Amino acid sequence: QVQLVESGGGLVQAGGSLRLSCTASGRILDFRLSNLDWYRQAPGKQRELVAAITSGGSTNYINSAKGRFAISRDNAVNTVYLQMNSLKPEDTGVYYCHQRTDYGQDYWGKGTLVTVSS
């Protein structure tokens, strides 16, 4: 059973930066062939996709994150990162890591809270 563990959340002032990490337990081959995403859920809102990276390294971002966030992966250590710069209060929420394997299995982390104060 794959487990995803996020870290790096916290309280930061607007304009600050945070780097989230998500490490997966399980076979490295499965991780290398997986697409990985970061979602967030703000209070009272639905969970939304923030950033995605394919197994081949292609990335995609929600419009509000473009130019500020960067998703990356290190397959050698089963870890995906989300570098968040120029944070805004509207970036506040619980950030979840998601892994979809090449055979269609989905895994989720339990989330890490990011709070951006104005």
Image: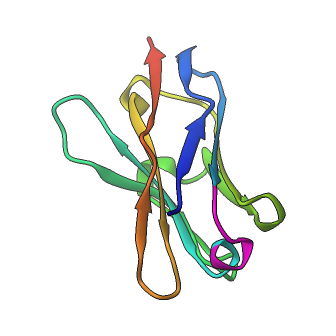
Confirm whether the magenta stretch covers residue 29.
yes
Q: Is residue 54 above or below residue 110?
A: below
Q: How many marks?
A: 0
- Residue 94 spot, x, y in % from top left: 39, 34
Is 72 rendered above or below residue 102?
A: above
Quarter of the rendering occupied by the C terminus:
top left
Q: Nearer the viewer, residue 38 or 90?
A: 38
Q: Position of residue 88 (x, y in %)?
A: 47, 27
Residue 92 lies within the magenta run: no
Q: Measuring 65% from the left and 71% from the top, which residue is drawn there?
A: 31
Residue at the front extreme, as displayed? 1
Q: Is residue 87 left or right of residue 91?
A: right
Residue extending furthest toward the bottom: 103
Q: Is residue 66 left or right of residue 115?
A: right
User: What's the residue at 52%, 86% (across, down)?
Assistant: 102
Chosen colour scheme: rainbow
* Region in magenta: 25-30
Judge left or right: residue 92 versus residue 70: left
Q: Residue furthest left?
A: 44
Q: Height in image: 106 above or below 56?
A: above
Q: Residue 59 at what x, y percent from top left? A: 60, 70
Give the residue at x 27% y 48%: 47
Which residue: 64% across, 82% down?
33
Picture quadrant of residue 115: top left
Looking at the image, residue 30 lies above or below residue 78:
below
